[in-house]
Amino acid sequence: MEDRVQVLEETTWRRLARAHAERVDAFVAPHLARRGSRVKHPVHDFLFTYYSQRPAQLRRWHPGFGVALEGGTEYVGLKGYGSSPVTVSAEHVAAQRPLLESLHALLGATAARPANFGCFGLHEWAMVYRSAEDETRHAGWPLRLGPAGTDAVVESHRIGCSHFDAFRFFTEPARRLNVLSPGRDDRAAYEQPACLHGNMDLYKHAFRLTPMVSSDLVADCFELARDIRELDMRAAPYDLVDLGFEPVRIETAEGKQEYAAAQRAFAERARPLRDRLVAECERLLGI
């Protein structure tokens, strides 16, 4: 592993840290305001309630391994940091080798697999299949087609969800309809580069590598996940028009075309971010 360390002057890194906080605050601040008012948002709260990264953690800027912070005494004592110089320590990176190896394998396998643009977001429909409206994950919002209409859409389509963290939320009747059986421990055998949830998870992979990777990469992945979540819920069975989200009607031919086109665009945005994460894993592993 490269031993040379770049030292950032205090005025430089504090400017970068402020810019990062301002960048993510455009999304973090409204979430915190809603949380303070006990108002839930089925689209925009997801990145903070489903993923384990807290808003304060997202706001804290990190330069990544190999960069030291002049005058950065507030970083001393944070997980992964050494004090002389103030930078992520090589010992921390070495201790994270199992995580780095597993992520490198998962991301590499995902990138190598053909993209599937034929799922049409039916995972969200399978999560409410044969459920009453007050039993759904977002019970405060009605189903566009009602329970019977929602069930009919599920039953008239091939369900082929490859992402375990979506599949595990399927209702029991829907699980039996999925033609794939992804598991918690075999993600590398199923993940594919067009999956909306797999591409949202690039944010999770990035923040799990904090503070070894730059917060710029984490923020880039966060913004991708934020935008994907909007498509994810616009194509879901819920009626969110009152929140300003026009539905992508995947039950129609036109809706399927709209969904697949957006999915392709997100896959293109995700590809270089996945490549950057793979490169960071290789840099930190010394390969």
Image (spheres, helix red, strand yellow):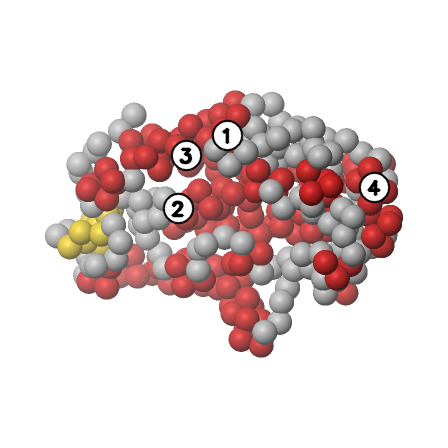
Tag 2–tag 3 contact (CB < 8 Å)? yes
Q: Nearer the viewer, mark 2 or mark 4?
A: 4
Compare marks 2 and 4 and give the one earlier in the sequence.
Answer: 4
| Residue 97 visible, this orientation | yes
Q: Nearer the viewer, mark 1 or mark 3?
A: 1
Marks 3 and 4 sit apart, C-alpha to C-alpha, by: 35 Å
Q: Where does label 4 land, which residue?
A: 153
Marks 1 and 2 sit apart, C-alpha to C-alpha, by: 19 Å
Looking at the image, which residue is at 46% across and 51% down?
219
Q: Which mark is residue 208?
A: 2
Q: Which mark is residue 103?
A: 3
- The quadrant in which the N terminus is found is top left
Looking at the image, which residue is at 40% across and 63% down?
56
Compare marks 1 and 3 and give the one earlier in the sequence.
Answer: 3
Q: Which amino acid type is shown beneath numbered disc 4?
A: Val
Marks 2 and 3 sit apart, C-alpha to C-alpha, by: 10 Å
> Where in the figure is residue 151, as x and y percent of width and height?
82, 45
Compare marks 4 and 1 and give the one earlier in the sequence.
Answer: 4
Q: Which amino acid type is shown beneath numbered disc 3?
A: Leu
Tell which of 225 and 152 is nearer to you. 152
Tag 4–tag 1 contact (CB < 8 Å)? no
Q: Nearer the viewer, mark 3 or mark 4?
A: 4
Marks 1 and 3 sit apart, C-alpha to C-alpha, by: 13 Å
Looking at the image, which residue is at 86% across and 42% down?
152
Q: Where does label 1 land, which residue?
A: 186
Q: Secondary structure at mark 3?
A: helix
